[in-house]
């Protein structure tokens, strides 16, 4: 049983000056970042908001601030790809953002009505009932998670099911289609104490393979031994229960390891996905052997959808899928029609095939032959249901970044008509997504115009000048779109709900460069009515300036980034500033798409968490998200020239800010998180463009992710040169600038195991580099605890102060 308990960050350092060398780990108490960063971190978060399915009510959620390290220090089990809190049988605290209060407000106006909750209440998983009259949520209690329901009419809340909800795999509950109650995954009533896994092992753990190819990606938090298996079975076994809003709860069927359960739109059937032994030590629970079945509401199996084997042999390419039925779901616009997908190419995109996926349907009572809705030349990427004669099926193909959207007639299945055919990375020509609305059963279905010939679409409206969200209609016969409304110049306003069938009254969220996001009702033929008035959460940053800058790489690719300058800065008066460039590379198949520029001048930007933008309060300029495109045109692999393209993009960015006079060579730092950390290490290893780097939660040795990483589909054995060339670990002897490494001790991201930073530090140390390595206890890939976030920002500020802001200060890393 792997429990995580630690109390202070660990720091390992090595400095170029021998007298300062410290090679042992040193415990350091958590430090506070300089003012005003700490004050901003402790400010009350802006409430969250959600509109009811009937578009009549707004619910406002009071969000908790950053959790304390003590909250993250609660016991945590890491089992089969999940992280759970054994105390309450729910997700670990590192994966929950708790809500502490809620209130209801009418869309038509009036004051918000707060719902009374117990003192110290915190909850998660809030969900509207299909009729919009109630909100259900899971309340954290000392002995477990309890189901509560808040009533809109009375603005009161009550417990409807005790602290026995099993939320190990997610929400743990969902509404019945008629809003009369909820389907709950409960802890079995007769479950005893957790198994004791502290006894000495009875023997070794053995893995073997009989020659069957089974390439597996670098998953985190897998089962490791018999003790983990016992704990997984204990905490993940659940009993389905129907919990009415009034009356007694009723059990459905027998307990099992239930990974998914959904009620049919007519409330007559259940679609269940369960896992069964033998459990695997090499893949997460979603790939364990299991069953997908349809049962009645008493738990009797009426149809077997799939008998799932262990799926540890899915091919490495990103378009690869498992064989047999997958993606089973209920059709949203019919009472009880089952829909699923089956690969026709063996699940391997490398196999030549005209048809890749087949979408099938089967109506209740599920004793007939399945009907083919449509055959697809690319991978199935979802379906949006509308009515008996209209659904829209999406496909995607990663190799080409291509997508299609096809209109199909479910009443006459077998073919479709393509209405969208595009590169899905092309932001300028995105026609928008189909707008949906909740039907009587609470399922999302296409929102049609009154005459039924067109559907509403919503899009980002990306242009060179900025994103200007829009509402439009799409003609189902031609695929052409027409815009009804678009956000005004200088504003960013997006639609979150339509209040009438003509799309003339909208609920929107609007922000601008100087005004925070707030909800409003917009009448396209009349007035705008504010619904909320949330203040600026960080007024200390109100004077910061931002501008989009554009520049060109040596090979002609257009690049851009957002330049932020501190409040009160004057270039002519103050001269060049120390500058941090914070970036994240992206892969493309089209240089023109890679070079698309979108201004952000109409967005309200305030940092949160451990954002690098907090450094604006300390006198730094920041070039945020400068383009780092890695382009593989005409079928070439982008990563085969990763280093060359990365260095060229970085050089162009440095030349641009130096040419503007806001930065100077020798006082520019580079940094990034995750793949941005990987980028940072490579730039320090292969260029002399930067004076220092900050690399957070990265991966630095690609031989430790041999079955693919990021957008690389090839295995190490197919492209060893690329894997080696892209690994900064292999070039640790070339890193001659100071580098700060930070990593969460409990990183849960695929591929960024903490050992990546540990071994990279060792390589840098062994080659005499100037390096500081900070390990944040209990933290995952993103940092959550207030102490961890504050300390990270302290480390970053202090590091840059001593390397590019005031290089004559005490040596880097001194205490």
Image (tube, rainbow, N blue to C red):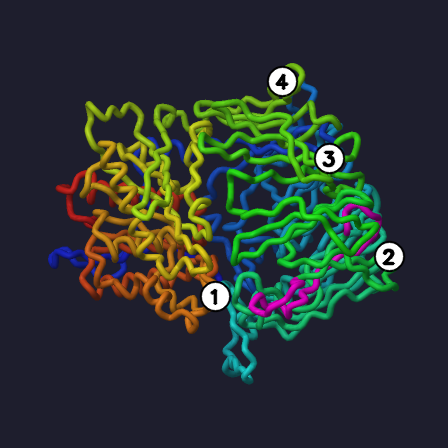
Viewer-proximal residue among 591 and 780: 591
Mark 3 element type: strand
Q: How far from the left and from the top, in percent, is residue 150? A: 71, 35
Give the spatial CA distance, label 3 vs label 2. Answer: 30 Å
Q: Label 1, on which residue?
A: 218
Q: Is residue 753 above or below residue 310?
A: above
| Residue behind mark 2 | 364
When asked about the image quadrant of residue 437, the answer is: top right
Q: Earlier in the sequence, mark 1 or mark 4?
A: 1
Q: Which residues are magenta?
A: 331-356
Earlier-in-chain disc, 4 versus 2: 2
The quarter of the displayed image where residue 34 is located:
top left
At 55% across and 69% down in the image, what residue appears? 315
The structure residue drawn at horizontal position 85% and vertical position 56%, both measured from the top left corner, is: 363
Q: Is residue 545 visible?
A: yes
- For label 4, the residue is 529
Q: Is residue 407 above or below residue 154?
A: below
x, y (%) of residue 146?
A: 67, 47
Would you say the magenta stretch is mainly helix, strand or loop? loop
Residue 158 visible at all: no
Q: Name the residue that disc number 3 marks.
A: 454
């Amino acid at each position: 049983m792997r429990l995580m308990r630690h109390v202070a960050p660990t720091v390992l350092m090595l400095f170029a000056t021998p007298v300062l060398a410290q090679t042992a780990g040193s415990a350091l108490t958590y430090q506070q970042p300089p003012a005003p960063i700490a004050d901003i971190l402790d400010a009350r978060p802006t409430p969250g908001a959600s509109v009811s399915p009937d578009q009549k009510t707004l619910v406002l959620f009071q969000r908790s601030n950053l959790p304390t390290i003590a909250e993250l220090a609660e016991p945590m089990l890491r089992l089969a790809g999940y992280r759970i809190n054994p105390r309450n049988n729910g997700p670990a605290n590192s994966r929950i953002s708790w809500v502490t209060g809620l209130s209801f407000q009418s869309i038509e106006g009036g004051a918000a009505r707060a719902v009374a909750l117990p003192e110290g209440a915190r909850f998660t998983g809030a969900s509207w009932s299909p009729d919009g009259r109630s909100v259900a949520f899971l309340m954290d209690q000392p002995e477990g998670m309890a189901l509560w329901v808040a009533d809109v009419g009375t603005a009161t809340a009550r417990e409807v099911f005790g602290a026995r909800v099993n939320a190990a795999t997610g929400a743990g509950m969902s509404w019945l289609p008629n809003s009369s109650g909820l389907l709950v995954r409960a802890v079995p009533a007769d479950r005893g104490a957790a198994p004791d896994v502290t006894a000495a092992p009875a023997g070794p753990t053995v893995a073997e393979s009989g020659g069957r190819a089974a390439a597996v990606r670098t998953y985190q938090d897998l089962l490791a031994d018999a003790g983990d298996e016992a704990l997984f079975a204990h905490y993940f076994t659940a009993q389905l229960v129907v919990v009415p809003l009034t009356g007694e709860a009723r059990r459905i069927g027998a307990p099992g390891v239930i990974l998914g359960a959904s009620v049919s739109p007519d409330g007559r059937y259940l679609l269940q996905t369960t896992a069964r032994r033998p459990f695997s030590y090499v893949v997460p629970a979603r790939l364990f052997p299991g069953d997908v079945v349809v049962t009645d509401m008493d738990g009797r199996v009426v149809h077997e959808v799939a008998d799932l084997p262990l799926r540890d042999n899915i091919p490495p390419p990103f378009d690869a899928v498992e064989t047999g039925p997958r993606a089973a779901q209920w059709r949203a616009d019919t009472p009880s029609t089952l829909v699923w997908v089956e690969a026709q190419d063996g699940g391997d995109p490398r196999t030549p095939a005209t048809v890749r996926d087949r979408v099938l349907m089967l109506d209740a009572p599920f004793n007939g032959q399945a009907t083919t809705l449509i055959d697809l030349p690319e991978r199935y990427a979802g379906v949006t249901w509308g009515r008996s004669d209209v659904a829209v099926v999406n496909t995607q193909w990663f190799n080409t970044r291509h997508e299609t959207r096809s209109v199909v007639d479910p009443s006459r299945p077998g073919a479709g008509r393509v209405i969208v055919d595009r590169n899905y990375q092309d932001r300028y020509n995105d026609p928008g997504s189909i707008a949906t609305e909740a039907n009587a059963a609470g399922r999302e279905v296409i929102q049609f115009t009154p005459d039924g010939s067109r559907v509403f679409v919503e899009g980002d409206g990306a242009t060179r000048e900025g994103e200007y969200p829009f509402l439009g209609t799409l003609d189902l016969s031609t695929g052409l779109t027409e815009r009804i409304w678009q956000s005004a110049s200088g504003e960013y306003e997006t639609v979150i709900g339509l209040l009438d069938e003509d799309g003339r009254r909208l609920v929107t969220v609007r922000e601008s460069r100087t005004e925070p996001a707030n909800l409003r009702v917009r009448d396209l033929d009349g007035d705008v009515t504010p619904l909320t008035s949330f203040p600026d959460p960080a007024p200390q940053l109100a004077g910061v300036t931002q501008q989009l800058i554009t520049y060109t790489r040596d090979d002609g690719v257009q690049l851009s980034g957002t330049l932020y300058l501190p409040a009160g800065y004057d270039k002519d008066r103050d001269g060049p500033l120390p500058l941090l460039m914070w970036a994240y590379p992206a892969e493309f198949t089209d240089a023109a798409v890679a070079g698309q520029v979108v201004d952000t001048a109409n967005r309200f930007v305030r940092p949160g968490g451990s954002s690098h933008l907090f450094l604006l309060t300390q006198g730094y300029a920041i070039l945020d998200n400068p383009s780092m495109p890695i382009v593989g045109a005409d079928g070439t692999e982008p990563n085969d020239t990763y280093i060359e393209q990365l260095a060229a993009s970085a050089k162009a960015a440095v030349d641009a800010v130096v040419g503007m006079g806001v930065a100077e060579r020798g006082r520019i730092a580079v940094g990034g998180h995750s793949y941005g950390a990987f980028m940072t290490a490579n730039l320090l290893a292969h260029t002399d463009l930067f004076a220092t780097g900050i690399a957070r939660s990265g991966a630095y040795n690609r031989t430790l992710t041999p079955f693919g990483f990021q957008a690389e589909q090839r295995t190490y054995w197919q492209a060893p040169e690329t894997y080696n060339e892209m690994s900064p670990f292999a070039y640790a002897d070339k890193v001659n600038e100071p580098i700060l490494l930070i990593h969460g001790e409990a990183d849960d991201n695929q591929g960024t195991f903490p050992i990546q930073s540990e071994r990279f530090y060792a390589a840098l140390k062994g080659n005499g580099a100037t390096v500081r390595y900070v390990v944040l206890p209990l933290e995952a890939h993103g940092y959550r605890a207030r102490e961890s976030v504050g300390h990270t920002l302290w480390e970053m500020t202090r590091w840059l102060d001593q390397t590019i802001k005031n290089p004559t200060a005490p040596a880097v890393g001194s205490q």
